[in-house]
Image (cartoon, rainbow, N blue to C red):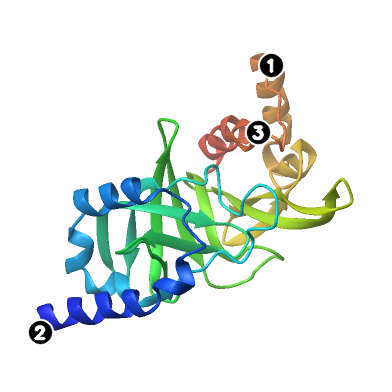
Amino acid sequence: MYRYNILFVSLLFFLSSSVFSENRPVDSGCQNAYLTEHDSLQGNQILYNGRLWRNLYLRVQDNQFLFSNDFLQGSVSMSGNEFKGLYIKYDIYNDEILVPGSNGAILQLNKEMVDSFTFRYQLKNYRFAKITEDSVKGFFGYVNILYKGKSTLYIKYKKEIDLLAVDDKYDKFFQINKIYLVKDGIVHLINNRRDLLKNMEEHKAQLKEFIKKNKIIVSKKDPGSFLPLVRYYDTLRN
């Protein structure tokens, strides 16, 4: 049965090869290296529960991916099953996860089955979870877990397309980051230090003193700058 499943997937890729002839985000040699090193993909049939991917945005400048157009080393949890040693891309325009298939094809994973994923970029590990309920506008889909304690801090990465942004001729991707604080089960959208302190009112004076003493600068451009305050706030909570 395993052999016939592999043959079926290979046949599907072969029949679809014309669709992907224009879409090679990494060269064939690099793609084959991924597959040679990670042949376990062939044995993890659950990963094939998705669909073949085609890049519909070749005419848009920049790209739709988080951090890099290259595949990044990571892992994916699907329906409670964890798959390590993968190479993935995170398309933040469509909020989808991609993995290399065979013969240069790319697979878009079945989002309904994905629980979480991780990847490594520039010596840093990123952890993402899937949020299924839209408690606050924009807080759904895949979110980066920046901190998890009594409170939780998340980042939602998103790209949009700015029409005719380049010389009034070409569209261009631009990125938007949203920061969310989850406290006592309630989700709060955080845009700046004022928003953060507003949701930590009971310890606001102590937090201001902590900021002053440690010369902390909080900026939405650097989501990690919120971390010291959230960690300290959690030490003050009963």
- Against 206, residue 188 (above or below) is below
Distance from label 1 to label 3 (Cα)? 15 Å
Which one is in front, 108 or 10? 10
Circle 1 SS class = loop
Kind of residue indicated by mark 3: Asp
Query: Label 1: few (<14), some or many (≥20) within 10 Å?
Result: few
Which residue has dot 1 on it? 215
User: Which residue occupies 30% across, 70% down?
Assistant: 47
User: Which residue occupies 72% across, 18% down?
Assistant: 212
Q: Earlier in the sequence, mark 2 or mark 1?
A: 2
Nearer mark to the viewer, of 3 and 2: 2
Q: Earlier in the sequence, mark 1 or mark 3?
A: 1
- Against 205, residue 43 (above or below) is below
Q: Return the mark for residue 1.
A: 2
The image quarter containing residue 161 is bottom right
Q: Is 209 on the left or on the right of 45, as rendered?
A: right
Which one is in front, 21 or 137? 21
Circle 2 SS class = loop
Kind of residue indicated by mark 1: Lys
